[in-house]
Image: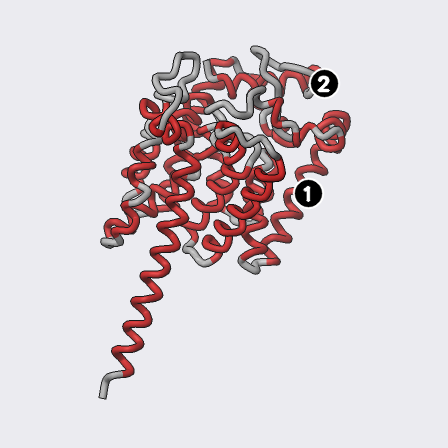
Amino acid sequence: MPVDLAVYRAGAEFVRAGIDLYAGPVVAGLEFTYPPFSVILFLPLSVMGLDVAQVAVVAINGVLLCFIAWRCAAEWWPVVVVAALCTEAVHTSVNLGQVNLALVALVLAAPRIGVGVAAGVKLTPLIFVVGMVVGRRFRDAGVAVGVAAGTVGVGFLALPQDSVDYWLGGLFADSGRVYAESGAPHNQSLRGLLLRLGVESPVVWLALAAALAVGALVLAAKADRVLAVAVVGMTGAAVSPWSWGHHWVWVIPLIAVVGRELAARQWVWLLPVPFLLGTLPPVLATANPLGAVPVLTSGPLWFLASNTYLLLLLITLLSTALSRRQASRGKSCLRSSRSELP
């Protein structure tokens, strides 16, 4: 069953019936964890049967995936589509009827307005606003914040009590509503990694998350558009209190970057390849299966398999830094050779 699609549809049915959206589970023991604005967008699902909704969402996600690949690699987007479908993030997003691909498409299609709308559906895209500020794109950040605030306002107008519960009642910050055990391998975030290592201090987590975010956003500010979207999006998943594997759909632009750079013989971009291969569903399932006993429960291989996405981000940041350093050296050598000309 497409579990997440069922949650979206049930949430919309609750709203139509006038039932409190956040009082408890909406379907199969699962709670609705998204902002009130999102459920307004999900209302069309409530007038469809689940089978019809599933077909519609699969078709929409297919179109979105093709659009994302085309925006990231126009000349060879079908290759990106195929490679992306092999990753657990994209495969699971489509399989569960998730909304993640729509968020990536919004950010790529309209960097300012799209970020604001995406943040109205799910909070993690707000990190792109921080990225705009770091890159001194203050007007873009202002537009994105204004649009995001507008989605909150729409939520209060349409669903005032649900909005009070979510925003003023602190539900937006309660990651326990997503999954009870924050240290489970399902949590592919920095917080999940630290808890699996036995580090429970929220101060340590926040400090490391802030350091990671600053370093990543500084690198992204000087990267090209596709790489920047990949880095900022993955960083948002990394510093979030909870991130499922399918939240890491930002690997799609990364796949395009890796392919582009390797085609240009920039061999430093071989570094992320093993970690991208590590996101294949059978590989991740060795330590992080859903509804089955894991093959790996401890040791180095378990650590790699249970933290693959976060390690992929770290190695991507390393590749980005090394690539910039090589480019700077190349420019310096070119300037030196020109200055020596008679």
Q: Residue at x 58, y 25 (%)?
A: 42
Residue 230 placement (x, y as % from top left): 43, 44
Crowding at mark 1 (Cα within 10 Å: few <14, some 14-19, many 20+):
some
Is 241 situated above or below 58?
A: below
Earlier residue among tags 1 and 2: 2
Residue 153 placement (x, y as % from top left): 72, 38
Q: Amino acid at mark 1?
A: Ala
The mark found on residue 132 in the picture is: none
Whether residues under marks 1 and 2 lie with C-beta atoms below 8 angstroms apart, the answer is no
Q: Residue at x 35, y 65 (%)?
A: 328
The image quadrant of residue 180 is top right
SS under mark 2: loop
Which residue extends farthest bottom?
A: 342
- Mark 1 = which residue? 149
Residue 47 lies left or right of residue 269; in this view the side is right
Q: Quadrant of the C terminus?
A: bottom left
- Mark 2 = which residue? 20
